[in-house]
Image (cartoon, grey):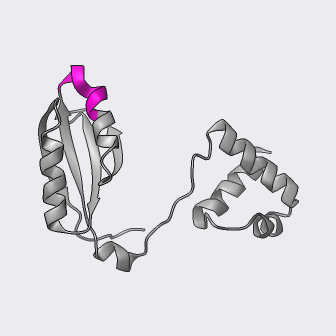
Amino acid sequence: MKDLDASIIALLKSNARMSVTQMSQELGASRVTINSHIRKMEQSGIITGYTVTLGAEEFRHNVSGWIMITVDASKEEAVIDELAGMPQIARLFTTNGRWDLAAEIQTSTLESLDAAISRLRQIPGIKETDTSLLLSSRVG
């Protein structure tokens, strides 16, 4: 049944709003079976939510970038908690090497990006940042 789970996930990744009826038709399984598998994956944490993917036109109206961050090791968890609470931070990763964290930031204007970066730099425990703006998407 792992193959069915993988097929359900693939369909949901391509269209998170796909109905159980559509999935059952495409996968040749009953609605009850599909629904049961989805419920089990949600309960076990395999599926943690559903999202909206914006098209390329919408992307051009947003300002996005990556912020590389070094933190005081004793304050890393507090910094992560603070960053996770910022609505402008779309994704946050721990890293190895020179930087401790990598944050994807998204705002509607350069001014709001500047304000968010200023707020981020004031978080106790953040030692250094380096920001790169995303200019265009070449893949995906």
Q: Residue at x 27, y 55 (%)?
A: 105
Residue 122, percent across and down? 12, 39
Looking at the figure, which quarter contains the C terminus? bottom left
**Residue 120 position within the rendered picture, expressed as x and y whole percent measured from the top left:** 18, 44
Q: Which residues are magenta?
A: 72-79
Quadrant of the frame with the N terminus: top right
Q: Quadrant of residue 126?
A: top left
Q: Is residue 64 magenta?
A: no
Q: Is residue 95 visible?
A: no
Residue depicted at x 13% and y 42%: 121
| 77 part of magenta stretch | yes
Residue 76: quadrant of the picture: top left
Q: Quick check: 57 left or right of 134?
A: right
Q: Residue at left 68%, top 68%?
A: 18
* Pick the front one: 77 or 22: 77
Q: Residue furthest top?
A: 74
Q: For the point 61% across and 63% down, which residue is it?
A: 16
The quadrant holding residue 31 is bottom right
> Can residue 77 be seen from the camera position used here?
yes
Q: Main secondary structure of the magenta part?
A: helix
Residue found farthest to the bottom: 57
Position of residue 95 measured from the top left corner of the image (x, y, whole percent)? 30, 36
